[in-house]
Image (spheres, rainbow, N blue to C red):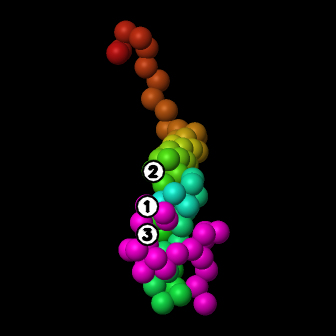
C-alpha cells in the first residue's frame, strides 16, 4: 500500500468532473490525486507551492553555509578589492 502525503484525496475522475470544486476544496493544502486508489499526483495551491520552494531554497542555503563554515578563507585588504 502506498503512503498518501495529504489529508484530502480525490480521484482522477472527480478531478476531471469538478476541477473548480477540487481547487476550492484544497483551500491551502495539498490534494492527492488517486488513480485506481493509488496516488498518481499531488495538486498544490500556488501559495503552498511557493512556500515549499522558498523552504527548499532556505535549506540549500543552510547546507552551503555549513559546508563553507570552516574555510578555506582568503585574506584580502580593502585595497586589494
In magenta segment, residue 2: yes
Q: Disc 2 on helix, strand or loop?
A: helix
Measured as percent of width and height from the top left, residue 36 is found at 48, 90
Q: Relative to residue 57, is residue 12 depicted above or below?
A: below
Chain part drawn in magenta: 1-22
Distance between the alpha carbons at the discs numbered 3 and 1 = 6 Å
- Looking at the picture, how far across and down is residue 1, in whole percent? 61, 90
Q: Say which label, 1 or 2, has the lower sequence index.
A: 1
Q: Residue at x 38, y 74 (%)?
A: 16
In which image quadrant can residue 15 be found? bottom left
Asked if disc 3 and disc 1 are in contact, CB closer than 8 Å, the reply is yes
Q: Secondary structure at mark 1?
A: helix
Q: Which residue is mark 1?
A: 20
User: Residues under labels 2 and 3: Cα distance?
Assistant: 18 Å
Dots 1, 2 in contact, CB < 8 A: no
Please name the residue that numbered disc 3 is placed on. 18
Closer to viewer: mark 2 or mark 3: 3
Q: Residue at x 50, y 47 (%)?
A: 47
Q: Could you say which disc has been placed on residue 46 in the image? A: 2
Tell which circle, 2 or 3, labels the residue nearer the N-terminal end: 3
Spatial CA span between label 1 and label 2: 14 Å
Amino acid at each position: 500500500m502506498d503512503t498518501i502525503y495529504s489529508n484530502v484525496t480525490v480521484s482522477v475522475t472527480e478531478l476531471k468532473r469538478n476541477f473548480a470544486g477540487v481547487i476550492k476544496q484544497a483551500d491551502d493544502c495539498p490534494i492527492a490525486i488517486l488513480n485506481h486508489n493509488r496516488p498518481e499526483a499531488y495538486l498544490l495551491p500556488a501559495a503552498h507551492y511557493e512556500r515549499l520552494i522558498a523552504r527548499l531554497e532556505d535549506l540549500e542555503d543552510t547546507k552551503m553555509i555549513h559546508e563553507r563554515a570552516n574555510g578555506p578563507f582568503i585574506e584580502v585588504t580593502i585595497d586589494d578589492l
